[in-house]
Amino acid sequence: MRGMEEAQIEKYRRAIEQTVAKLPVVDGSVSLESIWLENSLPRDLITEILQQGELHLPENVRRIVSQRGRKTLLRREPVPEARRP
């Protein structure tokens, strides 16, 4: 039964990733509300998946915010550049 739940979560995760790739990005941010409007998944489910932090986001998306940008739900940490010898 647990494997079935994980498969469902993975399906929702992919749906969110595909949705984010299509949405407009403003100052590196995409809003929870725009994800919700585009794919109609429940906000609680979207928030739960965002909190797991295992999303593959486009390079231009640095964070996903809610409440008109007042709360950051997911922030992508910058990848440190490789040090040159």
Image: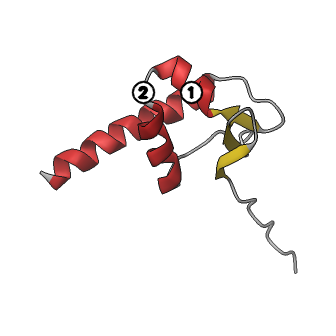
Residue 28 horizontal side relative to residue 48, left or right: right
Mark 1 secondary-structure assignment: helix
In the rendered structure, which amino acid carries the disc numbered 1?
Ile
Query: Which residue corresponds to mark 2?
Result: 41
Left or right: where 73 falls relative to 14:
right
The foreground one among 50 and 11 is 50
Q: Which of the pair 30/44 is nearer the observer?
A: 44
Residue 61 at x, y = what percent?
71, 40
The residue sitting at 76% across, 59% down in the picture is: 78
**What secondary structure is found at the residue carrying circle 2?**
loop
Upstream in the sequence, badge 2 or badge 1?
1
Q: Residue at x 80, y 30 (%)?
A: 26
- Residue 49 appears at what percent x and percent y? 45, 46
Q: Please say if the residues under marks 2 and 1 sit with CB atoms less than 8 Å apart.
A: yes
Residue underneath mark 1: 35
**In this picture, is 68 found above or below 24?**
below
Residue 69 position within the rendered picture, expressed as x and y whole percent measured from the top left: 75, 37
For image coordinates 69% across by 48% down, the residue present is 72
